[in-house]
Image (spheres, rainbow, N blue to C red):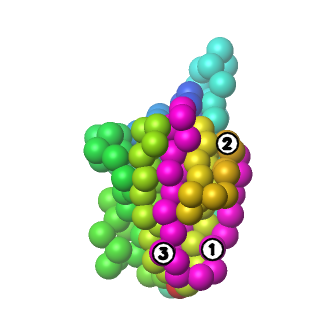
Amino acid sequence: MEIITWVLSGEVEHSDTLGNHGIIRPGLAQRMSAGTGIRHSEHNPNPDVEAHFVQMWVPPDTQGIEPGYEQQEVGHLLDAGGLVAIAGGPDSGAVIVINQRDAVMYAGRLKAGESVSVPVAPHVHVFVALGSAVLNESDALAEGDALRLTDEGPHAIIAGPEGAELIVWATA
C-alpha cells in the first residue's frame, strides 16, 4: 500500500521499523510504502494542539516492493498558488513518486477568489479540506465536501471568500 499523509493543522509524529522518524506539519507531504512489510506508529506529539490530517491509501501497481518512507517540504510550492502535483507515478512530475502509475494527488492552498483548472483524467476526486469553493461557477462546496467527476471536463474550481485547501486525485 502507498500511504500519503497530509496535515492540515497541528502535527503528526511518525516512526517505523526501518528507523525512519519524522514530524509532519502543514506544508510537508509524507509517503510510506508498506511494501513487503513495515510496522509504524503515528501520533499527535502535542496533546494541547489538535492534529487535523488526511491519510490516503493507494494500492501499488507492483507487488513485492520494498517498504519505504519519504517526507518532502512542499509549502513553498503551495504558496505560489494553483494545484501542485504532490504524489504520483514515475512519469507524473509529482514531488513524491509512488508505486502507482495511474494516480496523481494534487493539493492547492487557494486564496479567496482564486480559480484553478481541475486536472483532466477519467476519474477525479475533489476534497475541500479547508474553506469553501465553487465548482464550475454553480456548485457550492463547503469544508469537508467531496465530489467525484467522471467526465473529463473542463472543470474549474474557485475558492470561497476565506480561501480553500483542496486535495485532488486524478486517476485513470
Q: Residue at x 34, y 65 (%)?
A: 94
* Left or right: 79 as drawn, with respect to 136: left
* Left or right: 80 as drawn, with respect to 142: left
| Residue located beneath label 1 in the image | 149
Task: Based on the picture, tell me whether residue 142 belongs to the magenta stretch.
Answer: no
Residue 2 image offset from top left, x and y in percent: 54, 66
* Amino acid tagged 3: Pro
Nearer-the-camera pick, 76 or 20: 76
Residue 75 in sight: yes
* Left or right: 38 as drawn, with respect to 28: right
Q: Main secondary structure of the magenta part?
A: strand
| C-alpha gap between disc 3 and disc 1 | 10 Å
| Residue located beneath label 2 in the image | 143
* Left or right: 30 as drawn, with respect to 13: left
Task: Characterize the local packing of mark 1: few (<14), some (14-19) or many (20 or more) Cα atoms within 10 angstroms.
Answer: some
Residue 115 image offset from top left, x and y in percent: 43, 53
Task: Based on the picture, tell me whether residue 157 belongs to the magenta stretch.
Answer: yes
Residue 65 in sight: no
Nearer-the-camera pick, 9 or 143: 143
Task: Characterize the local packing of mark 3: few (<14), some (14-19) or many (20 or more) Cα atoms within 10 angstroms.
Answer: few
Q: Residue at x 51, y 57 (%)?
A: 157
Nearer-the-camera pick, 84 or 23: 84
| C-alpha gap between disc 3 and disc 2 | 23 Å
Q: Residue furthest front?
A: 138
- Residue extent of the magenta highlight: 144-171
| Residue located beneath label 3 in the image | 154
Q: Is residue 69 above or below residue 91?
A: above
